[in-house]
Amino acid sequence: MEFAGELGIARDKIHSLAEQAGELLAENVPPANPEQKALKELWSVADNQEKKVIANLMTKLVTKQ
């Protein structure tokens, strides 16, 4: 996130990319642990707005570490 910000990528674009990554992972990558399985299940039942919230929370989590 910080690197993308330094490159001048808008926060909205970063969140959009996070949504796309979530979709790709949910469709193509099997969960490796119970936490990933829970996240995949949440993603599969979420509508578009809820997916945006999940993606935003994940990017927020990454920036705190």
Image (spheres, helix red, strand yellow):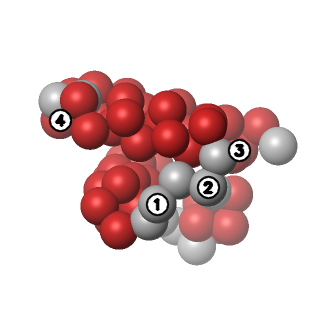
Does residue 20 show up? no
Residue at mark 2: 32
Residue 59 placed where, x, y %? 56, 44
Image quadrant containing the N terminus? bottom right
Say how many tags the image has. 4
* Picture layout, residue 46 above or below residue 43: above
Q: Mark 4 or 2 closer to N-term?
A: 2
The CA distance from mark 3 to mark 2 is 23 Å
Q: Secondary structure at mark 3?
A: helix
Residue 45 placed where, x, y %? 23, 29
Marks 3/4 in contact by CB < 8 Å: the verdict is no
Mark 3: few/some/many CA within 10 Å (<14, 14-19, 20+): few
User: Which residue is pictured at 68% across the width and 67% down the height?
Assistant: 3
Q: Residue 39 vs residue 2: left or right?
A: left
Image quadrant containing the C terminus? top right
* Residue type at the position of mark 4: Asn
Q: Residue 14 vs residue 50: left or right?
A: right
* Residue type at the position of mark 3: Thr
Q: Mark 3 or 1 closer to N-term?
A: 1
Marks 1/2 in contact by CB < 8 Å: the verdict is yes
The CA distance from mark 1 to mark 2 is 6 Å
Marks 4/2 in contact by CB < 8 Å: the verdict is no
Q: Nearer the viewer, mark 3 or mark 2?
A: 2
Q: Which mark is residue 30?
A: 1
Residue at mark 3: 63
Residue at mark 4: 48
Residue that sits furthest to the left in the current view: 47
